[in-house]
Image (spheres, grey):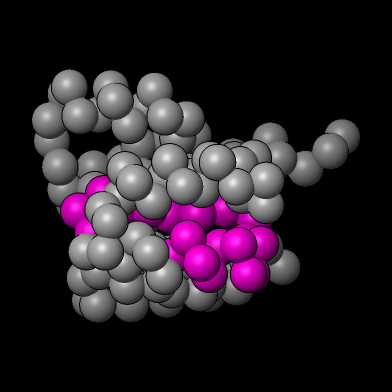
Amino acid sequence: MSKILIIEDEPDIAKVVRKRLMDHDYEAICAPDGYSGVQLARKEAPDLIILDLMLPAGGGLNALQNLRLSPKTQLTPVIVLTGMQDAEYKKKVLDEGVDAYLEKPFESKALLRTIGYLLKQKKPS
């Protein structure tokens, strides 16, 4: 069972995403801000991270940079799931090394398809 970390400060969104993941046989853990998300990622070594950008305690971009700097999480696939719709900021985030960028509101099927694809890519052949 793949473990997915959801770093999301909106409790309702985190709850919906977590339920969708659990309904599809993923283990889902949550963190409410960037700082605790990075700490939890280092401790739990998730197979994939879903990251909001508009976060308290450092923000999503800062969390992403910290995840990419840590040997424990630098290769972990990251899906950004955000309500931010700024093309320049999106480019900056993509340049930091995210694996997928989805905007809110999002479709569960698109998120699950993206997760499945990234987890397949991660597994050694």
Above or below — where is 66 with respect to 11? above
Residue 124 position within the rendered picture, expressed as x and y whole percent measured from the top left: 84, 38
User: Which quadrant: the C terminus?
Assistant: top right
Above or below — where is 37 with respect to 89? below
Q: Quadrant of residue 20?
A: bottom left
Residue 46 position within the rendered picture, expressed as x and y whole percent measured from the top left: 62, 61
Q: Tell me: 83 left or right of 31.
A: left
User: Which quadrant: the N terminus?
Assistant: bottom right
Residue at 34%, 46% in the rendered image: 62
Please tell me which residue lies in front, 111 or 79.
79
**Residue 18 is at least partly visible in this image:** no
Can residue 48 be found in the magenta stretch?
yes
Residue 8 position within the rendered picture, expressed as x and y whole percent measured from the top left: 31, 65
Residue at 43%, 41% in the rendered image: 65
Q: Which residue ends up furthest to the right in the rendered image?
A: 125
Q: What is the magenta range?
A: 37-55
Residue at 31%, 67% in the rendered image: 33
Please tell me which residue lies in front, 81 or 19.
81
Q: Tell me: 48 left or right of 111.
A: right
Above or below — where is 90 with respect to 26? above
**Residue 83 is at least partly visible in this image:** yes
